[in-house]
Amino acid sequence: MTDATAPAPVEPVSEKVETPFRRFLSEFTESKLATGALLVLGVIIVLALIAPLITPQNPYDLAQVDVLDGRLPPGSEAYAGYTMWLGSDGAGRDLYSAILYGLRISLSVGVTSGLIALAIGMAIGLIAAYVGGRIENIIMRIVDLQLSFPAALVALMLVAILGKGIDKIILALVVAQWAYYARTVRGTALVERRKEYVEAAQCLGLSNARIVFRHILPNCLAPLIVVGTVQTAHAISLEATLSFLGVGLPQTEPSLGVLIANGFEYMLSGRYWISVFPGLALLLTVVSINLVGDQLRDVLNPRLKK
Amino acid sequence: MTATLEVQGLKTHFFTRAGVVKAVDGVDFSISRGEVMGLVGESGSGKSITGFSILGLIDPPGRIIEGSIKFNGAEIANSTETALQKLRGNRIAMIFQDPMMTLNPVLRIDTQMIEAILAHEQVDKRAAWERSRDALGQVGIPSPEERLRAYPHQLSGGMRQRVAIAIAFLNRPDLIIADEPTTALDVTIQAQIIFEAQQLTRQTGTAMIWITHDLAVVAGLADHISVMYAGRIVEQGTTDDVIDRPLHPYTVGLLGSVPTANSRGQKLHQIEGMTPNMLALPKGCAFGPRCSRSSPACMDQPLVADVAGRRVRCFHPHLDAEVR
């Protein structure tokens, strides 16, 4: 029975279908450092989310803040009776509470601006790659122009024009970052566009929008995720920089950058904790995001596969 | 009865910086319902470009500069993108060479199949899913429900090509253009795929253009064979005629270079020289410089002549019996 009619032998399909996600997960956890960083990041995010439940004080509520508690060293007891494990800042805010609330602002600003910039940059990059021709040239020259300035400079100029406030900071960060996403997506999409499955999709009579967003985009996600992670860390530190320079968030919405700036004037008088603890929190956040991003790059880039 | 596809004087040229590449330069053929036409030629002879011209998928700098493509009697050469989009995958489907490349690696088989149906028809997802399952069953895929849930990388090459064929037949097209669909597969799988394709064309009455460089593949499959060389069809006739009594020296050369049981131990025939540079085709007959029968007359372009029930572009066809 070697007739051509004989059905092809059945290949065993394992019970657990190996989805790309599962494969990705097992490869990601190969690095202990990155897994640790992911855990740390997870803890930081959870702490930031449940901050009101686990902090003794709401640093935004002026009724709870006592100026007499100002500049207390770590471990002191507050007037209200709780212990300030990380000390207090110049205005009498409990630093532990202030850091967790600050993390909320820093993370949400970073993630929001990152997501908006990603959506905008992704759409623009995909269109540039798929349409090509003059439109692509114009878009990519704008991207080049923007990337020739340091992101901090672009953001600084914008905030100087727009003024303070969380929405303005996000806008400035989006403008400073969309070009990175656009360039990344366009690069990958150009490669994907030449692949045969796109031609096959065209031969199926699918619409252009469908081909771009359903077929090309999912194949461009890997580098996009990596850039997104690293850029989010970048956005967080950029926001801290702007706030530190006094052009970012106002005193009433203290992000980590504002807290660091607040303590800066006390550094020389030996009251290190006001700047150092928020600084450490920022460092830990940014480093763990970057470590996760590095591992993502290693796992998602087929060229780096062993 | 109108032919499913009638191509007349098709010319697709590419206007590159180095010059004009006449990839397809005056191709005529017609194909009726349920017929299989083998389009045979070497790499770069314009077979695939002919296929893409029919679908209107020629990217700049290339374009169809002349000729007519009549599909079910209606002219579709240079018609609008929206009109072509309605035909593609619906009335005219395509099967590609490399099944590793033509399925989207990040989408499951069911997603890709259902999408192909929904692009042309208003049916509910469930019905589309059932049709996809039946289509997989028809091309000889065991346990199609499970395969539908798989990603392309979980299937073997032959399996993927079956999926590609199933997708091509999904919307019951009138014409399928198969661009070297078995070239990337090993010989046993090749035979199975050809068998499935042949069976499906018989069942559905779909016309098929089977593009290949391998005469042996089309010998058992096609009703007609068109042999292409340097953008032109040099010989066209029924499969038996072309295989048994080739007229054009190029067809003779191609057939002579196929190893057979009788040629064991002998040196295989070889066509002298290389395929011509498409930017600088030789004057007159493009095959002239490689042809053993060429004469000064071949410095002019030979016209298509009806010889012994076939259409041949040659001044010196092998009419005598001393073939091979």
Image (cartoon, coloured by chain):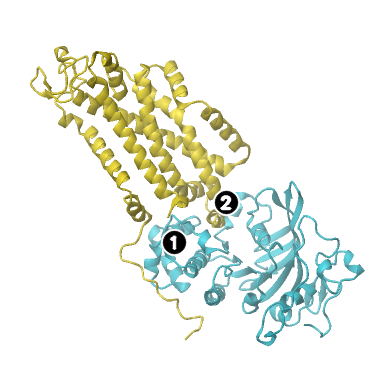
Chain colours: A yellow, B cyan
Q: Chain of mark 2?
A: A
The chain ID associated with circle 1 is B
Near mark 2 (Cα within 10 A), the count class, few <14, some 14-19 or many ≥20, is few
Q: Residue at the spot x=14%, y=12% of the render? A: A68
Vertical relation: B229 (above or below) A284: below
Q: Nearer the viewer, residue A71 or B87?
A: A71
* Side of B90 relative to A63 (left or right): right
Q: Residue at x 49, y 67 (%)?
A: B157
Foreground residue, A282 or A120? A282
User: B72 left or right of B256?
Assistant: left
Against B245, residue A296 (above or below) is above
Viewport quadrant of the N terminus of chain B: bottom right
Asked whether B6 or B39 is in front, the reply is B39
The local crowd at label 1, few if under 14, some if 14 to 19, many if 20 or more residues have their Cα within 10 Å, is some
- Residue denoted by label 1: B153
Kind of residue at disc 1? His
Q: Is residue A279 visible?
A: yes
Name the foreground residue: A190 vs B91: A190
Q: Amino acid at mark 2?
A: Arg
Query: Is any part of residue A253 visible from this angle?
Result: no
Left of B253 or right of it: where is A269?
A: left
Expressed as whole percent of the image width and height from the top left, the position of residue B140 reads: 46, 74
Q: Looking at the rendering, which quadrant does residue B213 occupy?
A: bottom right
Residue B200 position, x and y percent, is 53, 73
Whole-percent x, y for residue A235 in the image: 38, 30
The number of numbered discs placed on residues in the rendered structure image is 2
Residue at image mark 2: A194
Coordinates of residue A148 in the picture (x, y in percent): 53, 28
Image quadrant containing the C terminus of chain B? bottom right
**Are the two marked residues, 2 and 1, in contact with CB atoms closer than 8 angstroms?**
no
Whether B292 is drawn above or below A185: the answer is below
